Image (tube, helix red, strand yellow):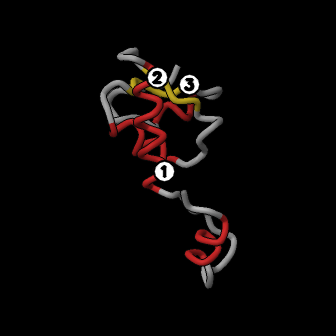
Amino acid sequence: MRDYRYYKEVCAGLPMPFAFVDLDLLQQNIQSVLHRANGKKVRIASKSIRSVDVLRRILQANAQFQGIMCFTVPKHSISRSTDSPTCC
């Protein structure tokens, strides 16, 4: 498991502020959610994941991810394609 020192070293010298996502750990989390969902469709809560790129990556990872739960209608544009908004 990567610890604080690892990330501190990896991010050393980057201009702040910045956001960092460990894509390996994101993939592990995606697989964990899919396993626990046991074949059921999964909607992502947009308030928990504030990055459009991360939301798109999750949606594209597996067809089991079926949309985004969001509070406001404009967020519906974050979907697999611009033709089919999936926010509800």
Name the residue at 50% across, 58% down: 22
**Mark 2 and 1 residues: CB-CB less than 8 Å, in contact?**
no
Q: Residue furthest front?
A: 1
Which element type, helix, strand or loop, lies under badge 3? strand
* Residue identified by numbered label 2: 36
Question: At label 3, which amino acid type do we have?
Answer: Met
Disc 2 from disc 3: Cα separation: 19 Å
Which element type, helix, strand or loop, lies under badge 1? helix
* Residue identified by numbered label 1: 25
Relative to 21, residue 81 above or below: above
Viewer-nearest of discs 2 and 3: 2
Q: Which of the marked residues, 3 or 1, is nearer the chain's N terminus?
A: 1
Question: At label 2, which amino acid type do we have?
Answer: Arg
Q: Quadrant of residue 4?
A: bottom right
User: Relative to 16, is 83 on the left or the right?
Assistant: left
Residue 87 x, y percent position in the rendering: 49, 24
Give the quadrant of the N terminus. bottom right
Residue 9 x, y percent position in the rendering: 60, 78
Disc 2 from disc 1: Cα separation: 16 Å
Q: Which of the marked residues, 2 or 3, is nearer the chain's N terminus?
A: 2
User: Relative to 48, is 33 on the left or the right?
Assistant: left
Name the residue at 43% across, 54% down: 24
Q: Which of the marked residues, 2 or 1, is nearer the chain's N terminus?
A: 1
Q: Which mark is residue 69?
A: 3
Name the residue at 44% across, 55% down: 23
Question: At label 1, which amino acid type do we have?
Answer: Leu
